[in-house]
């Protein structure tokens, strides 16, 4: 069973994504900001991360930067955000994100994107 870490300060978004991914057979963990996510990451060793960008304490971009440059991990990261501005998207990719999805998005699209990392 593949493990997914969802990082988002919106508990409703975490619940919606978790529900769908659990239905699809994923084991799901969550955190509400980048700092909390680092703690969860160290305990659970997820196979993939889904992270929002705009969060308190540590943003998604800071989180991606920390994973790639401090922890030196190559776990696939899918960034999700309501901000689809080109500058934000390019910064996410420059920091090491593997994919970017603009909110709102289809849960089915998210599942398809996740599955491409496990085939």
Image: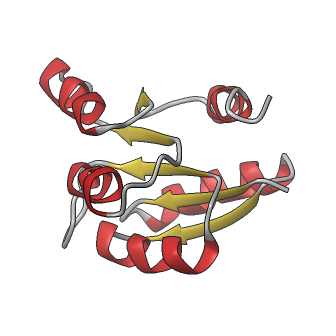
Residue 2 in the image: above or below residue 109: below
Residue in the image at 69% along x and 63% along y: 28
Q: Position of residue 94 (x, y in %)?
A: 23, 30
Residue in the image at 27% along x and 62% along y: 70
Q: Position of residue 24 (x, y in %)?
A: 84, 46
Question: Splitting the image into 4 quarters, where does residue 34 fall?
Answer: bottom left
Q: Position of residue 38 (x, y in %)?
A: 40, 72
> Is 10 on the left-hand or right-hand side of 42?
left
Give the tally of numbered discs. Answer: 0
Residue 36 in the image: above or below residue 87: below
In this view of the protein, which residue sits in the foreground, 119 or 100? 119
> Is 20 on the left-hand or right-hand side of 43?
right
Residue in the image at 74% along x and 32% along y: 115
Q: Position of residue 23 (x, y in %)?
A: 85, 52
Image quarter (top left, top right, bottom left or bottom right) of the C terminus: top right
Question: Splitting the image into 4 quarters, where does residue 62 fall?
Answer: bottom left
Image quarter (top left, top right, bottom left or bottom right) of the N terminus: bottom right
> Is 3 on the left-hand or right-hand side of 75?
right
Residue in the image at 33% along x and 69% along y: 33
């Amino acid at each position: 069973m593949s493990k997914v870490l969802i990082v988002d300060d919106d508990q409703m978004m975490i619940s919606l994504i978790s529900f769908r991914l659990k239905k699809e057979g994923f084991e799901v963990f969550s955190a509400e900001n980048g700092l909390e996510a680092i703690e969860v990451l160290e305990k659970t060793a997820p196979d993939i991360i889904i992270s929002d960008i705009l969060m308190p304490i540590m943003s998604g971009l800071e989180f991606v930067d920390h994973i790639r440059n401090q922890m030196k991990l190559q776990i696939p990261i899918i960034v999700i955000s309501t901000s689809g501005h080109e500058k934000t998207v390019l910064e996410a990719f420059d920091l090491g994100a593997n994919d970017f999805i603009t909110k709102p998005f289809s849960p089915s699209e998210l599942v398809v994107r996740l599955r491409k990392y496990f085939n």
